[in-house]
Image (tube, grey):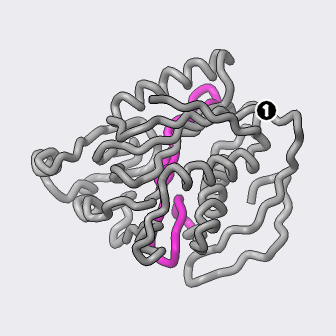
Amino acid sequence: MPLGTRSTSNPEREGRIVVANVIETAESPACPVLRIMRLEGFRPYAATWDLQREIHAERVGDSCTDTLVLLEHEPVVTIGRNAGVGGLLVPEALLRARGIDLVRTDRGGDITYHGPGQLIGYPIVDLKGLHNDVHRFLREIEEGLIRAIARWGIRAGRNPGKTGVWVGDQKIASIGLRASHWVTMHGFALNVTTDLSPFDLIVPCGITGCRMTSMERLLGGAKPAVREVGAAVADELSRLWGRTPVSEENA
């Protein structure tokens, strides 16, 4: 649980999953701003990686405020710097023949898939103005996602020893971060209405036997709007970080 917060309930366990504690966060009219940058359409990974680097440089130079970029990607498999061997189960040519790009990136974590129907969030946040703790920041992202999807009645939690958000033994959200000069990059992927079949082409997050799920699957076919889920996540993360969310639309 993040330091400086207070739990209002005891942890509950469902199998191996630790259900999130409810965290109280003090709010103040003088809270710093969290810019919520929403990108429309399906975005190629390389272009948004360039955008992240641009915003990161601005944040390091203190020429912009903390920013959360929300978007959906075109189909892509990304491989993080901690990836092991054998995470890609098919030849790269077959992947690309199915219209799925492949990118080796500098984020933490292993291999994963991004595509339409999946909420991507890239928090570019100066941890010096927060708590100087990358691990705690990761747990706060998990907490924000858990609390956001609870609005749709989904009871999610953590899997001890593994990152991300889980429902039972199935993973619904993955997280991979990078921090430089105490400013974060990369972030999370939450399966909302994602086609889960491309995950069969990889070993998701490098976890043998890992099964992925989505909000749509858990809700029996109901299709939450990715934009609405993004708004809920932005709201919860803003509360956890003591920030005032300010939306910025981008075509």
Picture layout, residue 130 above or below residue 169: above
Q: Secondary structure at mark 1?
A: loop
32 left or right of 169 in image: right
Residue at image point 38% right, 39% down: 41
161 left or right of 104 in image: right
Task: Give whichever of 126, 116 is nearer the camera.
Answer: 116
111 left or right of 101 in image: right
Residue at image point 63% right, 21% down: 60
Residue 203 position within the rendered picture, expressed as x and y whole percent measured from the top left: 30, 61
- Report which residue position mark 1 lands on: 32
Residue 45 position within the rendered picture, expressed as x and y whole percent measured from the top left: 35, 36
- Check residue 118 for magenta coloring: no
Residue at image point 79% right, 32% down: 32
**Is most of the magenta stretch helix, strand or loop?**
strand
Q: How many numbered circles does the render carry?
A: 1
Picture layout, residue 70 above or below residue 230: above
Residue at image point 34% right, 31% down: 46
The stretch in magenta equals 160-189
Residue 111 visible in the snapshot? no
Disc 1 residue type (three-letter): Pro
Q: Quadrant of residue 96?
A: top left
